[in-house]
Image (cartoon, rainbow, N blue to C red):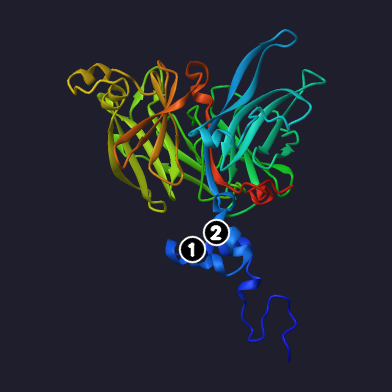
Amino acid sequence: MACTQMNCSKNGTTSAADLTDDLIIEILSLLPVKSVCRFKCVSRLWYLLISQHRKRLPQTISGFFYPKHIYNNEDGLIGFPTFNGISRDQEQLFPDSSLPFLTGYRQILPKDCCNGLIFCFCWKDSPIHEADYVVCNPATEEWVVLPDAGHKSDALAYRLGFDGAVSPHFHVFQILEGDEDYGYISGVNIYSSETGAWSYKENGWGNNEIQIVEMRGVFFNGMMHLLTCEFKILAVDTEGKTWRTISLLETMCVENINLGPLAFIGQSQGRLYFINMRDNDSSKLSVWILEDYNSNEWIFKYNISTSQLFGELSGEKDHMLQRDYADLMFQRDYALIAIHPECNLIFFVWRCKDVLLSYDMHRDQEWKHDSRVEADSCYRQLYGVFYKCWTSGYQNQTIGLQL
């Protein structure tokens, strides 16, 4: 019986002509350079795929959106997004970073981001006192207006969860406060782009007196992770069915009476990271990795000397004189804002210099980036964008919103 399916050859196997461009590129990227060069002769299509690979291959966009404020005679002080790329080439991917495709809004404030999607609070042109919560993809210019959450409790925070490698759908976690107004979590309202609706779940962590730290959450393993003032990491899945509490080691728990827990959580290369200031030594940061997610096993990985890091960036090579920078305090003088999801880079904002810095934990190298940031006003509002993006005609294949 003859094979009549479009993608079958006579012997029942897939021929090279049936392969998609994406699959060909993925295969070629695994081969030695000399072999790839020879394959230019296979066909005109292969020649174009190989010779124009920079336009075809996926690139990781790395940079930060944050709200920039200007004075407008009509509206007063207004905010709109701006983008700081880690390199100049990446800044060109967003020539107008104010997100002009979000029409009908006079002010747009980014509030969170996750794997290329941005969660924004948008004030309408009319009526001017009304606003929407919007999730958008700045690369594809797709966007979704979230419906009213329909819950009367005050929201402590909103956190965005998205993993395009697993699902095209995103989730927004609305962390709700109890009636006593002490900042304790009463429950979580979860929006699903698949259903287009919110679903409320009561606090399932078994403790009604927990407060979250005012920093971004981490969407990892299909769960949203939140750091608490009680030095625990809370996690809840996208359906509100699974609730976890991840304990920390005693040496990981360092706080300041004014600044709270001096710590940061993030995820990179499939691991959950925890970075904290060393107890009784403000000039060092300790980096921990959750080695076994199921058994809560934390492994110490690195120490980072911030006095050396900031001293060298200021041009001071003498290790004795670098001690002048030992009093710089985490969260007061500088802030950790992101970990790169694919490598060992962590990103700082140095508030007194208003600059964005990156540090390679593995190579013990730091870089001062070209772009300046309004660090004093927005260092807590820098939202990292790291994701695979197709360019030059392949934009429709970028990770996007499932509308």
- Element at label 1: helix
Mark 1 touching mark 2, by CB under 8 A? yes
Residue 157, picture quadrant: top right
- Reply above or below: 177 against 77: below
Q: Is residue 138 left or right of residue 316?
A: right
Q: Which residue is mark 1?
A: 37
* Residue 249 x %, y %: 32, 39
| Residue located at (22% from left, 19% from top) | 323
Mark 1 or mark 2: which comes first in sequence? 1
Q: Residue furthest top?
A: 73
- The type of residue carrying mark 2 is Ile
- Element at label 2: helix
Q: Is residue 32 visible?
A: no
- Reply above or below: 291 against 180: below
Q: CA distance from mark 1 to mark 2?
A: 8 Å
Circle count: 2
Residue 316, picture quadrant: top left
Q: Which residue is mark 2?
A: 50
- Reply above or below: 51 against 114: below
User: Which of 164/54 is in front?
Assistant: 54
User: Which of 203/162 is in front?
Assistant: 162
Q: Is residue 289 left or right of residue 203?
A: left
| Residue located at (73% from left, 79% from top) | 5
- The type of residue carrying mark 1 is Cys
* Residue 401 x %, y %: 68, 46
